[in-house]
Image: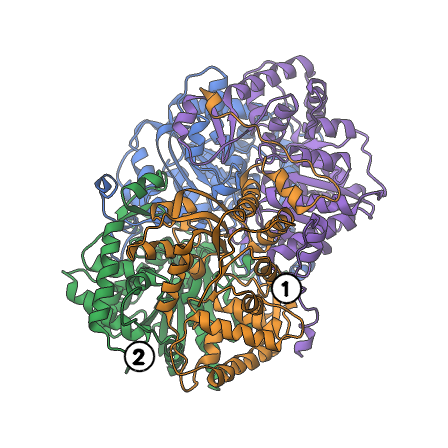
Chain colours: A purple, B blue, C green, D orange
Amino acid sequence: MKRKYLTHPTRPIELKAGMTCDKLLEGLEGCSFQARSLAQAARIWAEALDDDIVIMLGLAGAMVPAGMRKVLVTLIERRFIDVIASTGANLYHDFYETAGSFHYLGTPNVDDAKLREDMVDRIYDTFADEEGFQGLDKKIGTWATKTLEDRPYTTREFLYLLGKEANRLSKGEQGILSAAYRKGVPVYCPAIGDSSIGIGLAGRSPRVIFDMIGDVEETADIAAMKRTMVIYVGGGTPKNFIQQTEVTNQVLGRHVDGHRYAIQFVADPPQWGGLSGCTFDEAVSWGKIAANAKQVGVLCDATIALPIVAAAVLTRRKGKKRPGIPKFSF
Amino acid sequence: MKRKYLTHPTRPIELKAGMTCDKLLEGLEGCSFQARSLAQAARIWAEALDDDIVIMLGLAGAMVPAGMRKVLVTLIERRFIDVIASTGANLYHDFYETAGSFHYLGTPNVDDAKLREDMVDRIYDTFADEEGFQGLDKKIGTWATKTLEDRPYTTREFLYLLGKEANRLSKGEQGILSAAYRKGVPVYCPAIGDSSIGIGLAGRSPRVIFDMIGDVEETADIAAMKRTMVIYVGGGTPKNFIQQTEVTNQVLGRHVDGHRYAIQFVADPPQWGGLSGCTFDEAVSWGKIAANAKQVGVLCDATIALPIVAAAVLTRRKGKKRPGIPKFSF
Amino acid sequence: MKRKYLTHPTRPIELKAGMTCDKLLEGLEGCSFQARSLAQAARIWAEALDDDIVIMLGLAGAMVPAGMRKVLVTLIERRFIDVIASTGANLYHDFYETAGSFHYLGTPNVDDAKLREDMVDRIYDTFADEEGFQGLDKKIGTWATKTLEDRPYTTREFLYLLGKEANRLSKGEQGILSAAYRKGVPVYCPAIGDSSIGIGLAGRSPRVIFDMIGDVEETADIAAMKRTMVIYVGGGTPKNFIQQTEVTNQVLGRHVDGHRYAIQFVADPPQWGGLSGCTFDEAVSWGKIAANAKQVGVLCDATIALPIVAAAVLTRRKGKKRPGIPKFSF
Amino acid sequence: MKRKYLTHPTRPIELKAGMTCDKLLEGLEGCSFQARSLAQAARIWAEALDDDIVIMLGLAGAMVPAGMRKVLVTLIERRFIDVIASTGANLYHDFYETAGSFHYLGTPNVDDAKLREDMVDRIYDTFADEEGFQGLDKKIGTWATKTLEDRPYTTREFLYLLGKEANRLSKGEQGILSAAYRKGVPVYCPAIGDSSIGIGLAGRSPRVIFDMIGDVEETADIAAMKRTMVIYVGGGTPKNFIQQTEVTNQVLGRHVDGHRYAIQFVADPPQWGGLSGCTFDEAVSWGKIAANAKQVGVLCDATIALPIVAAAVLTRRKGKKRPGIPKFSF
């Protein structure tokens, strides 16, 4: 009877000098624990790109200050992702870098009160220029007042325009917003007020009004276009916002089966019960994820997991075309 | 020279039969690690209630399904908190329970595909009735269409009306929304589209429009009223939304010094660099927290940390009046 | 069909001023996530004390520097535990405090290089006197050279004698070792070389020799005496050492069924695959835990979980006698 | 003044198809959070191999069942490590695989009671054959009885002989023990009783006696030979056992300065106060780590962090000779 369980031996990985990320992950598929999950994430993503799907990315955590901006640009330009839901902070920091400013290598072992005196902001081991941020806050506010009409905007419309502006200001750098603008990748920000973008828009007249429910409807429409893949870099609001598209469609009476491909790089374990850490198995009960979905979660800091998986996917998709890249007619 | 560091011996806690939560935490103040932090959180909260402050609570995680609803009602009714920023999910589940429905004791060791067949949703070790939820989604949608005027609403206005409705439907149960409605405690939801409330409002005409920037401005105004205390139950959008009030005020040219009291029960460590897990020390660099604030973070599941700390605060504040409870004139 | 799953509604906890730890945990049993697990741990422990069992405690982490010494003394004196397997560090720090020295309240936000200059050791947020430690290292070495005969000692024999010495040196303070000595509770230390006890014994002649396999056999004998309960405060070597008693007995041809009661307070999640974080479900597959055991793991810092659970057990067992307290005839 | 902090901009990583692990980590050095730490670990390790040092590896967690055996063999054969302290379990599982048996790919979503009925052991997502283990337990016991003389053995002596036996039994496979035997790399196991090796030795006559304090002295001697590097794969007893060598030498009156190079892949955060999760900064206060050591900790599952870092070090050291590889004359 034990033969039922003992079918495939683990295959201990053998390292080689000059090993690519692709080969490393291939080797880790025969290993265990989070290494195997990491390897499965790369396989699921690379193979899903042969299917006719829409790929939705949820982006949380301080990924842009952490140096992940160009990884995300590559994912957009190669169309390994089709839709983005992000925290406002990532988009704000992305605009900031695209327009020519920087985040800085720092350390968590520092006197934060002294940083404050010098107007230096800390994001764990990364520093930033508070005056630069305050300047950008105001610039975004002024730009919005000047640019926007007096009507509600979905965050997708707003961020398209902001991406256009980022693209205009850029001297060669590309960012999430500018690349998404150029590539026709819609970007949503379900908590846009909760960020420096929101701060920049405060106290202005006329007040910018966001059509949040429009975002909900649009993302549900997108999820109903085709089978879907979801990718979560961190949890939080972006993860839930994409997860819920299947539920929205069910409540709207549309026939959907749950997302068909799903990977996540989230450092939260499921035992706290929150949505950030919850497994895709749990999501099956809600109908958010299809029972037979190809899915895996990796319990790992996304700054490690995302680049290595994306590098492997890039290698595996070299020279391959993706069928049915979705086009959006907003 | 070592005498400089070796000043106060730890005081190993002694347990007693019949020990209250208050006495337990008193004893843990002389101990170490997260126990000491937990004890400090109770002390900071209880003592802050003697100061003339506004207390802002950020509420994330599935706290209502986890059985924390009445804890939160007590905090509102006793005015241990004055303002709430919450995820939509907590408010939705709160409305659901207040209106007479239930969450159920479950287990994570279950076949989620079978749960799906039976339309049972799982939240880690807790079950819920998907049909009940879909019914409520539609009910909220219908109520909103019927109730709201054709103009943008801040989430505070919207949730006040929803609290009024919860209060009307309640047969004795109190919830976050209904208690907040009765007690004049404003409730904000910076990502309201990202929840079953957002789902319930989808596909309706006229579309409900939220004034998210109005929320940003109002919470900044509140934070400028008095010195502030912040309490974070989980991280995510609610934590950042309250943290940022100090930055908004600085950008608006108001003189603020950062929050003066701060406690958080967040299970994320700071090493992932995200806002959820970031320390209050880090927040000092941003000017969100005052350099001399009384502050502590507890790395612990909030379902453990919140009730024990709140029980101790309840004991310590018995018979005591709080000076300067803020009143809001919205 | 959903009725099969939706049987017992959660019972949101209601806080009261003056609430005892016992009542708090009673209330949390109707809640979810780690709070429910914490409450179940107290129930399992309190109820197991009515059964005729041996209770084995695994003790890891810096619990004595963290102020947990007297909690452990109470557990020994009340015979809520019968056998201890510990890291060497906890026993060393226990001896140190029992003999009249102290650990000190400190902070992690400090310059460790300066601490080193002043010979102050840091244990996260707790300080200690390196010179005091070095003095004790030598004192233990000298004592051992003087006291021990030239034959292998199980760690249980050695720690009994060390407990006797602690008891002799004590001016009123009780510790794990001294209380265990007085109450006939055997203490094992499966990695005794890996601690300041081991350091203190280094470079001495004749060399102290430990009979580690004697420890393995004795603990297996103890586990074969009666049904067993296991309690893990932290993971590591002590947890595995107690877990394995059931396997040892099976290999020795004894009929055992796995531990019948099991609770753990371990902050490691199971997803890393290590023994520290592994669940009792996983242990069922190994025959370490009985399939029908009453068992629960709590993902929480033990400095929070242990005292609150122990306080509740103390309250629930007030005035109750425990049947069949095991006596050991070493 | 802010210029003091804002000196080196982050350098967002750019992915390329066919990217090697080496180039990935080179790119991540300009990023943040755990990615930067991971990259620094590779740099520190690769550069330390140009210095005249002894490199000590602490090995905990179920690394061999997880498929890391051959990674460790490569590290031994290339002499990227010189000394090993391990849990017993890793060495047991290593012997098992070297002798021709397997671990198996499994899943955590399984009924453990059924696994038990079929005598299948689970290690998170990995399965093993309990009968195979019980057979090996007895085989090790019989081998030891037949092979060992009636005197205390350090675990290093014992594991050398066990490595010789593993090498004899191997049909081409290499493991930690067999490679260490062939390459003259001493292996220590400070809690050898706490493992299936200990179980296998139970109930035998004459009883095998381990000289644990001999292990303590020998490792201290080794640490006093040269400057030292420490590498921790997981925490627990192996980490502490190597950390303490500097303290032992200080107590023995030898002049040592703390380990000079230090990297760790441990998933425990420091906030629990235990030795597993403690930072190298904390260790500076104890004199375990030199104040000016090149050191970094990576908060990550070691099954991810170890192979990628080792692959990069392999690439960077290709064709390079290491000066002063230590030889041990036991």
Residue A196 is situated, as x and y percent measured from the top left of the image, at 56, 25
- D326 with respect to D281 (left or right): right
Identify the residue under disc 1. Answer: D107
Which sits in the foreground, A241 or D260? D260
Identify the residue under disc 2. Answer: C326
Helix, strand or loop status at disc 2: loop
Instruction: Inspect this view and state whether residue B182 appears.
Output: yes
Q: Amino acid at mark 2?
A: Pro
| Quadrant placement of the C terminus of chain A | top right
Residue C141 is situated, as x and y percent measured from the top left of the image, at 25, 64
Residue D169 is situated, as x and y percent measured from the top left of the image, at 61, 77
Chain identifier of the residue bearing label 2 in the image: C
Q: Residue at x 39, y 27 (%)?
A: A113
Which sits in the foreground, A49 or D69? D69
Q: Amino acid at mark 1?
A: Thr
| Quadrant placement of the N terminus of chain A | bottom right
* Above or below, C208 relative to B299: below
Which sits in the foreground, D254 or D74? D254
Q: CA distance from mark 1 to mark 2?
A: 39 Å
Residue D47 is situated, as x and y percent measured from the top left of the image, at 54, 44
Residue B133: give its label.
Answer: none
* Above or below, B249 relative to B199: above
